[in-house]
Amino acid sequence: MMQQLTSIVCRLLFIAAFLLGCLAVWEKLARLFGYMILGGYYEPWRLLEFSAVILLFVIALQLREIKMSLRERGSD
């Protein structure tokens, strides 16, 4: 049960990081043409920072899943 929950959370966080990265690119492109998608609340580099932090958590969760599966194999 916990492993399924971890897997779902990992996937959701990965999708969120990907969407934030895409939003950062679109915001940068819009600003090159003089528009703002987010109304100036967040700079594109700040969105990329948020995306990188989320990806760091995704990597940590993936490593935890790998460690758990190796532990299960070792006990067999």
Image (cartoon, rainbow, N blue to C red):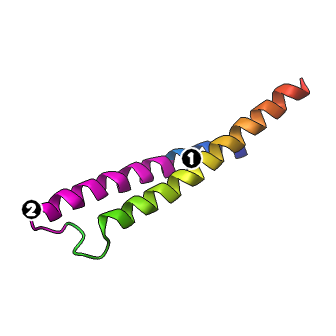
Task: Classify 10 Å Cα crowding around label 1: few (below 14), some (14-19), many (20 and above).
Answer: many
Query: Is mark 1 in CB contact (under 8 Å) with mark 2?
Result: no
Q: Is residue 68 left or right of residue 59?
A: right
Give how far apart the Cα atoms at labels 1 and 2 are.
35 Å
Looking at the figure, which quarter contains the N terminus?
A: top right
Mark 2, secondary structure of its residue: loop
Residue 36: percent from left, percent from top: 17, 69
Q: Picture quarter containing residue 69?
A: top right
Q: Is residue 60 visible?
A: yes
Q: Residue at x 43, y 52 (%)?
A: 17
Residue 10 in picture, x, y percent from top left:
56, 47
Q: Please name the predominant secondary structure of the magenta segment in the image.
A: helix
Q: Residues within 10 Å of mark 2 (few under 14, many from 20)?
A: few
Residue range highlighted in magenta:
12-36
**Quadrant of the rendered image containing residue 76:** top right
Dot placed on the residue nearer the N-terminal end, 1 or 2: 1
The residue shown at (43%, 53%) is 16
Extreme residue toward the left, this view: 33
Image position of 31 with respect to 61: above or below: below
What residue does disc 2 label? 33
| Extreme residue toward the top, this view | 76
Q: Which mark is residue 10?
A: 1
Left or right relative to 10: residue 38: left
Secondary structure found at label 1: helix
Q: Position of residue 46 (x, y in %)?
A: 38, 67
Give the percent coordinates (x, y) of residue 40.
Answer: 24, 75
Q: Is residue 29 above or below residue 70?
A: below
**Residue at x 12%, y 67% (from the top left corner):** 35
Q: Is residue 43 magenta?
A: no
Q: Amino acid at mark 1?
A: Cys
Q: Give the mark toward the camera: 1 or 2.
A: 2
